[in-house]
Image: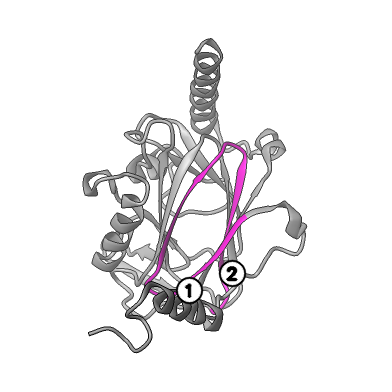
Amino acid sequence: MTEKGTASTEGARSHARAQAAAATIARPDLPEHIAPSKITWAQRIPSGGYTNVVLGRGTRIRLGDPAGAACAHLLLLRADAPWERLNVADTMKVPWQAYLSSGHPLLSDQGRVLATLVGDTSGHHDTLCGPSDEARALLRLAGVKQGLAPRDIAPSVTFFRGVRVESDGALTPTGSSGPGATVELLVHLPVILLVANAPHPLDPRPTTELDVVVWSAPDDLADVPDSGPEYQRAVQNTEAAWTAAMNQEAVA
């Protein structure tokens, strides 16, 4: 049965446009130090929502937790070679640190830096548990929009809800840091960004809205933190891959 007035093409179009006009689209909070004209992409993700976008090298990503209960499950895949993706084990192993904080690289399974965490006012993150069932389903939906299959959805990192390892090996959730926390990432190679806003597997509380704001900042690549020899080798691997890709493109 069709709704009244939607039996014809004209009626259905009018009905759809009326619904769109009445819809309220929540806008993300924009960083004060970045002119709105420089923002290239921005979205407020509702609880139980997801997003996907392709981002270029030198892009800066700002994740925001405006109400204090967002949970961002994030996965990165190299845009020009999606078989290369975030490797959470190496992301912990190479910097000798399981807890994410400013200066931490997000490494691929080829030893390259997909992005570096360059700003963090939260400190409540997780590399140990992976996505919850709900988050994994949302990441798969996000991946489909980029031509990815379920097998392409690897373990993710989680921002804004933390976990700590106790002396006996138990994992203890630490919750969030409260409203207004932000995380900023700098992209080193073109990537597909997938984000799901869903509860953490050890913290099933409902989530609140999550902000994602993106702008171009290629000059920031010259100022990435020096986080030790392992990080520098990963950056060298990344730059070599980028140079090879550019040379290949020039020859083609």
| Left or right of 88 in this view: 25 | right
The magenta stretch is 41-67
- Residue at image location 75% in from the left, 55% down from the top: 37
Q: Position of residue 200 (x, y in %)?
A: 34, 69
Q: Earlier in the sequence, mark 1 or mark 2?
A: 1
Amino acid of disc 2: Ala
Query: Which one is in front, 72 or 169?
Result: 72
**SS assignment at label 2:** strand
Most extreme residue toward the bottom, as rendered? 4
**Which mark identifies residue 176?**
1
Q: How is the image coloured?
A: one colour
**In terms of depth relative to the viewer, which is nearer, 165 or 175?**
175
Q: Which residue is mark 2?
A: 181
Considering the image in quadrants, where does the N terminus appear?
bottom left
Q: Is residue 230 left or right of residue 131?
A: right
Q: Are marks 1 and 2 in contact (CB under 8 Å)?
A: yes
What's under tag 1, amino acid-wise? Answer: Ser
